[in-house]
Image: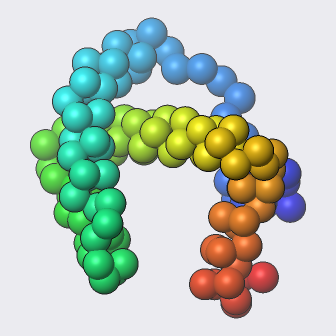
Amino acid sequence: MDDDGFGEDFPDWESGLGEEEDRRLAALAPEVSRLSIALLRRSVGTFPAERVAQEALDCADDVLKRYGTDGLRVLVMSLTCWATVQVEINAHASGRPLEALLDDMQLTWLETNPEEA
């Protein structure tokens, strides 16, 4: 298993985007980033928790329909950037190392997916 905890099926990204691909994705970034913020607004504080997953799926379906797979890729990049910043803010505010927070996230995942352990 790799350091990322996902094993060999999830390879490390080793190459950058080509110029054409970079331009294509950059053109979608402002609107898809706006949609990612709207998704977070709809999801934060949502109860029951299953509604969060439904909001995410609805957003992903909308992005796929409107922008294709490039839009989905930008959505993943946007949400990952927001999540990364929040993990870093949380670590700084709590005085905990980043790895400790990420370990907690992985432990939660393992607890909800015991067959994966």
Assign the N terminus to one quadrant of the image.
bottom right
Q: Give the percent coordinates (x, y) of residue 103.
A: 77, 61
On screen, residue 32 above or below 115: above
| 74 sits to left or right of 35 | right
Who's the residue at 28% across and 70% down the image? 46
Who's the residue at 42% across and 17% down the image? 22
Q: Give the percent coordinates (x, y) of residue 21.
A: 40, 20
Q: Quadrant of residue 36?
A: top left
Would residue 101 be visible to someone looking at this image?
Answer: yes
On screen, residue 43 above or below 35: below
Q: How is the image coloured?
A: rainbow
Who's the residue at 73% across and 73% down the image? 107
Would residue 73 be visible to someone looking at this image?
Answer: no
Q: How many marks?
A: 0
On screen, residue 53 above or below 94: below
Q: Give the percent coordinates (x, y) of residue 56.
A: 30, 62
Q: Residue furthest top?
A: 19
Who's the residue at 30% across and 51% down the image? 40
From the viewer's side, name the closer residue of 65 and 101: 101
Q: Residue furthest bottom?
A: 115
Q: Give the percent coordinates (x, y) of residue 58.
A: 20, 63
Assign the C terminus to one quadrant of the image.
bottom right
